Amino acid sequence: MDQLKNVKSADKVAEEIIEWAHNHGVSNAFDRAEKLKPCPIGHTGACCKICFMGPCRLVGADAEEKAAGVCGATLPVIAARNFLRMVAAGTAAHSDHARDMAFTLLEACTGDAPDMKIQDVTKLRKVAGYLGISIDGKDMATLGKEVAEKIIANFGQQKGEVSYVSRAPKKRQELWRKWGLVPRGIDREVTEAMHRTHMGVDQDPENLMMAALKCSLADGWGGSMFSTDITDMLFGTPTPKRSIASLGVMKADEVNIVLHGHEPTLAEMIVDVSTEPEIIAYAKSKGATGVNLVGMCCTANEVLMRHGIPTAGGFLNQELAVMTGLAEAVVVDVQCIMPAIGQAAKKFHTKIITTSHKGKMIDAVHIQYDEHRAKEIARQIIRVAADNYPNRTAEGSRVTETAPVIAGFSHEYVEYMQGGSYRGSFRPLNDAIMAGRIRGVAGIVGCNNPRTTQDSFHDFLAMEFIKNDVLVVSTGCGAAACAKAGFMLPEVALEKAGPGLREVCEAIGIPPILHLGSCVDCSRILTITTAMVEAGGLGDDISMLPGIGIAPEWMSEKALAIGCYFVASGMHVVFGSESPMAASSVVQDIKHNVWVERLGGRLDFISEPQEILRFALEKIDAKRDALKLKKYEPGKFGAERVLMSMEDRRKLDKEMAANKG
Ligand code: NFS
C-alpha cells in the first residue's frame, strides 16, 4: 500500500497515461484534484445553501453548540439535511434509470420497441411471482406487459408498500414497519426528502437521518432491484464470460467505440449490430479492419456481464480513454460522465456522442436514442464513429497491456453452482461459513475518487479479504478495479485465497472475488444475503450474517444511497475518506448508535485502508461470535466436506419445506 502513496493510480496502464497527460500539459482529474482542495466547510457538512439568506457556514470549535444559520438552523440539522439530499439524489438517479428500463420492457412487450424482446422467460415468470401476478395461460408479451405496468406503478404509487419490500426477510420487513421506513412509492420518497429538506420543514436531525434510510430503501428494494430484474429479463441473466480489462483494450487498427454511462439498452443494441456484415464493411471502407467496442463505468459492467465486451475501466479512466488517441467515439447516456471528457476530446479526434435528452454536453454531438428505432440509431452511431477513423492523428498515449477477467456472476448463477437447476441453494456457502472455512462475506463496491490513489483501496481490500478467507462480491467501479488488477481470473485469486476459502471456491466452482455487475446490481447482494438467510444456519435476518459492505473510494451520491440501503437492511457499511457529516457529532452518533440500535447496521467513514480491513474483520468476527459459530482460525476447520451428501440434501429439503409451510 505505502509504495502506492506516491502514484496517482494503482492501475499501471492508467498511471502511464496520467504521466503522459501531465507531461503534455493535458488537463486531467488527477492534476485538477491536486490543485483544487475540497472546501473544508462543505466537505464536513457544515455549509447550508438551501435558501438564499445564506449560504450559511457554521464554523468554529463550538459551532455545534453555539452556531446557527440566519434562520436558526443548527449544525446537526444542516449536516443531516445535506446528507438526506445526497441520498435522495442517489436514489433518484438509480430509480430514473430503472424507470427507463421499465418503459423499455413495456414497449418491448407492446411491440413499440420492435428491436427488443424478452430474452429470459424464466426470470419474467419469477418476477411476476414476486409481484403477485398470475402467469396462468398468459403469453410472454401479455405477462411482460403486466409486469412492466406493475413496476411502473411502483414509481408513482402514493400509498402502501413498494412491491419488492416483500422479498426481504420477514424480520427485516417487520423492523422497517416498526420504524416507519417502508417506502410507499419510489418517487414519493424522493419528493418527500426534497420537501423535508426545504427551508423550515424537518428540523430534527434524527428524523432527517431516518428519512435518509427510508428514501434509500426505495432505491435498493425498489429502483435498483427493478432495474436489475428488467435488464436480466430483456437482455439475459448473466452467466460467466471471459474477457479483458484495462485501457489497453483499444485496438490500433479498428474503430474504437467506448460505451460509457449506465442504462444498458442502447449499448445492447450497439453490441448487437456491431457484427453485422454491412457495419463491418462500412468500417473497412474507412480504412479500419473492424469495429472494437469497449465499455466504461457501469455500462461496461452490463455488457461485460452479458457479452464479454472488454472493459476499459471505471470512472477515472474516462478522460484517459480519450487520451489514448485511439477512441473514435465515446457514447454516453447518463450518470458519472465527466464534463472533462468533452474538453479532453477537443485535443484529440474523439467525438463525444450524447444520446439522452437528460444528459447533453456542449462539446458533444447529440444523437437522441429512441427505442422505436433502436438498432437504426445504433448503426448510425457506429457509422459516425467509423467516419471519424481517418481523422486519427499520432497524438496520444498508446498502451496495449490488458488483464484477463471472468465476470458474469448473477445471483442465479451463484445459486446454480451450489447444487444445479433443481437443488440450487445457498446452503453450501452457509455451511462453509458455519464451519469456519469461509470467515464471512464482503461487498466491495462503488467509485474511484482522485483524492485516493486510483483502485488502490479496492485492490488492497479485495486481496486482503480473500487471504483472510473472506469471500468478496463486487460491483461498479470496484469490480472494474479488481478486473484490471487481474484479480478476477479465478486461478490468480485462488492462489492468493486463504486455504478454507480456496477449498470452498474450488468445490463449488466459483472464484473468490465475484463480479456481480453494475452499481444497480448491488441489489443482487441484497438478494444473495436474503437467500443466505433463507438457506438457514446463519440467523433469521440479514443483520446476523457475518458480512460487511464497503465503498472505499466513493465519490457519488448514488454510493451514499447504496450505503444507506445496506445499513437499513441490517449491514455494517464502511466508506473510505472522511464523513460528509463530520462537522456534527450529533449526526455522527445517529448514523452509528441510533441506526445500529434500531436496524442492526451502521455507517462508518474510515480513511485508512488498513483500518478499514481491521474494522471489517472485527465486525465479521463479532457476528460469528453472536451466532456462536466456530471461531475462525486460518487453515483450521473440520474434516467434513463442503458439498452436502444426498442424505444431507434430503434433510435440508425437508427443513426448508417445513420452514416454508
Ligand atoms: Ni456507481 Fe456506476 Fe462508478 Fe461510482 Fe459511477 S460508474 S453507478 S457511481 S463512479 S461506481
Image (cartoon, helix red, strand yellow):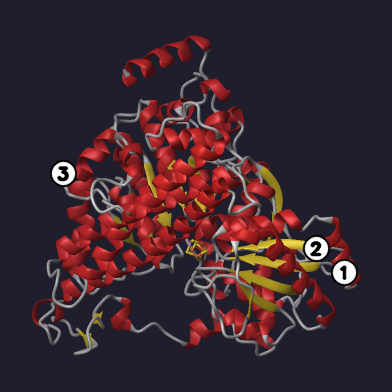
Q: Position of residue 463 (x, y in %)?
A: 54, 50
**Is any part of residue 247 visible from this angle?**
yes
Asked whether 366 or 492 is in front, the reply is: 366
Q: Could you say which disc has been placed on residue 485 in the image?
A: none
Tell me what residue is drawn at x 36 percent, y 56 percent.
Answer: 563
Q: Is residue 517 above or below residue 61?
A: above
Classify mark 1: helix, strand or loop: loop
Asked whether 653 or 96 is in front, the reply is: 96
Going by the numbered disc 3, the residue's amino acid type is: Lys
Q: Position of residue 372 (x, y in %)?
A: 61, 59
| Count of numbered circles on the image | 3
Q: Position of residue 522 (x, y in %)?
A: 45, 50
**Is any part of residue 465 visible from this angle?**
no
Residue lying at the far top in this picture: please name it: 647
Going by the numbered disc 2, the residue's amino acid type is: Val
Circle 3 is placed at which residue position? 178
Q: Quadrant of residue 578?
A: bottom left
**Which of the image's four quarters has the C terminus?**
top left
Going from N to C along the chain, the mark reached first, 1 or 3, is: 3
Tag 3: Cα neighbours inside 10 Å, few (<14), some, or many (≥20)? few
Classify mark 3: helix, strand or loop: helix
Tell me what residue is drawn at x 81 percent, y 76 percent.
Answer: 387
Asked whether 492 or 81 is in front, the reply is: 81
In the shown orientation, is residue 640 left or right of residue 197? Answer: right
Q: Could you say which disc has been placed on residue 291 in the image?
A: 2
Going from N to C along the chain, the mark reached first, 2 or 3, is: 3
Q: Position of residue 215 (x, y in %)?
A: 29, 58
How far is mark 1 from mark 2, CA to CA?
A: 8 Å
Check if mark 2's residue and mark 3's residue have beta carbons within 8 Å.
no
Going by the numbered disc 1, the residue's amino acid type is: Ala
Q: Could you say which disc has been placed on residue 288 in the image?
A: 1
